[in-house]
């Protein structure tokens, strides 16, 4: 009897199981179905601030209270869960919102969020450093601000 093959285009995916590691439970990258199903507050925020249709020609304007209340405080309340950082990464928060709006006057929350999301990208083996190539002076400034 021939082996059964799973069709790649079937659209069927199994829910990911949480892995037990010591006393913590790790959950994998959020699936698009999970994001759409729950309409997470980060998704709503992304649609409002950086996932707007059309091509951007100007830098997005970041309001520090939005960063603090809508992103930082939520992450802090959750204990900076990796899954939440991955959700922000998949919503392209770094590429489309945080880095384009970075300046030397950016808040510490802004800089730390960039570092956290860049770290999440590296942990997922995603290309990270090419995001920063076009603005080497700002990249240096960001690292000075991290100290």
Image (cartoon, grey):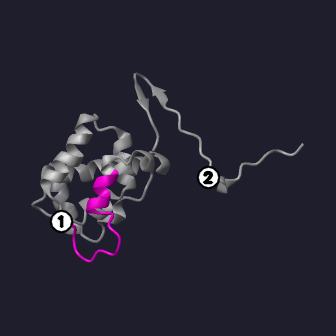
Crowding at dot 2, Cα within 10 Å, few <14 / some 14-19 / many 20+, comes out as few
Badge 1 marks a residue whose secondary structure is loop
State left or right for residue 128 relative to residue 71: right
Crowding at dot 1, Cα within 10 Å, few <14 / some 14-19 / many 20+, comes out as few
Q: Position of residue 72 (x, y in %)?
A: 21, 45
Q: Is residue 96 magenta?
A: no
Q: Please say if 124 is above or below 56.
A: above
Q: Position of residue 128 (x, y in %)?
A: 37, 58
Q: Residue at x 42, y 48 (%)?
A: 35
Badge 2 marks a residue whose secondary structure is loop
Q: Residue at x 24, y 41 (%)?
A: 74
Q: Residue at x 26, y 77 (%)?
A: 57
Q: Is residue 52 magenta?
A: yes
Based on the displayed image, in which of its 4 quarters is residue 102 positioned?
bottom left
Task: Specify the farthest residue to the top.
Answer: 23
> Where are the magenta residues, as a range?
43-61
Q: Residue at x 13, y 54 (%)?
A: 64
């Amino acid at each position: 009897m021939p082996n059964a093959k799973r069709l790649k285009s079937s659209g069927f995916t199994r829910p990911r199981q949480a892995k037990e590691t010591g006393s913590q439970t790790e959950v994998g990258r959020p699936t698009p179905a999970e994001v759409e199903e729950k309409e997470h507050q980060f998704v709503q925020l992304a649609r409002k601030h950086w996932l707007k249709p059309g091509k951007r020609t100007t830098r997005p304007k970041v309001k520090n209270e939005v960063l603090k209340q809508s992103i930082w405080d939520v992450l802090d309340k959750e204990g900076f869960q990796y899954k939440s950082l991955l959700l922000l990464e998949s919503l392209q928060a770094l590429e489309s919102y945080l880095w384009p709006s970075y300046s030397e006057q950016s808040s510490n929350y802004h800089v730390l969020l960039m570092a956290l999301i860049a770290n999440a990208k590296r942990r997922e083996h995603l290309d990270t450093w090419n995001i920063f190539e076009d603005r080497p002076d700002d990249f240096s400034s960001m690292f000075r601000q991290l100290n």
